[in-house]
Image (spheres, rainbow, N blue to C red):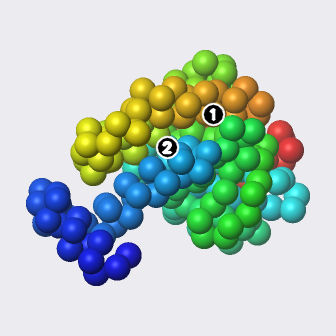
Amino acid sequence: MSNLAWQVGRFLFPSLQNATPRALIYDNLLFIKSFQKGFVLIHGALISSVEFGGILISGFSDIGKTTTSQILARKGFVILDDDTIALDKNGFCIGRRRVKRIRPRILYLLERGPTSCHELSKDEALRKLFSICVENYLYSRKIFHHYAHLNDCIDIQSIYDTWKAYIKNLVNTIPCYTIRAKEPHKFADIITEMSYRVG
């Protein structure tokens, strides 16, 4: 980002003075530009392997997605991204770390709790994944809301509906599971075991 964009961002949004404004401005621009290019954003990690194909891992912030991905990378998986995934209307995902278009074969939603794994209905998977994404991208995006307020070309309801439709299309085409554990290495163990079972 140019120094000018940084200064303009600080001037327009003084509440960001003490935050990490460059990252916040970048995240908001990424959200808007991705939507304009036909993508919605998924808060999660995208990993793949020759043997199992693409695996999408999501969960609320600080649940352990990055650590789980790093553990799985030591087991032979490739990390395509560990934070923000671009999803198109056909269910294909693109990670920022390694730009590769891939269709996930399975979705895991990580939660804290006693160790368990169970398959979700399509409605449950949609509700859970959408709530994770909305919490991460819409509720925390002050710049996006200011921008939408000042520009009639941004229709928040349209973005919301499109986002939900894309996620619905994704979860309707792949098996979706909730994994509960107290530590990331348990998440990784269950994902490895399930990949052999499902794949």
Measured from the top left, where is residue 16 in percent x and y? 17, 60
Question: Can residue 190 be seen in the rendering of this structure?
Answer: no
Horizontal side of residue 4 vs 160, given as left or right? left
Measured from the top left, where is residue 149 in percent x and y? 26, 38
Residue extending furthest bottom? 3
Q: Amino acid at mark 2?
A: Gly
Measured from the top left, where is residue 3 in percent x and y? 28, 81
Q: Residues within 10 Å of mark 2 (few under 14, many from 20)?
A: many
Rendering quarter of residue 120: top right
The residue shown at (73%, 47%) is 92
Observer-nearest of 135 and 67: 135
Q: Amino acid at mark 1?
A: Tyr
Horizontal side of residue 10 vs 153, given as left or right? left
Look at discs 2 and 1 and give the one toward the viewer. 1
Question: Can residue 161 be seen in the rendering of this structure?
Answer: yes
Observer-nearest of 23 and 118: 23
Residue 101 sits above or below residue 182 on the image: below
At numbered mark 2, what does the secondary structure look like: helix, strand or loop? loop
Q: Earlier in the sequence, mark 2 or mark 1?
A: 2
Horizontal side of residue 50 vs 147, given as left or right? right
Observer-nearest of 149 and 123: 149
The residue shown at (69%, 38%) is 89
Query: Can you identify the residue that label 2 sits on?
Result: 59
- C-alpha distance separating marks 2 and 1: 18 Å
Observer-nearest of 28 and 149: 149
Measured from the top left, where is residue 90 in percent x and y? 75, 39
Viewport quadrant of the C terminus? top right
Residue 29 sits above or below residue 131 on the image: below
Horizontal side of residue 20 vs 32, given as left or right? left
The residue shown at (38%, 76%) is 1
Query: Can you identify the residue that label 1 sits on?
Result: 166
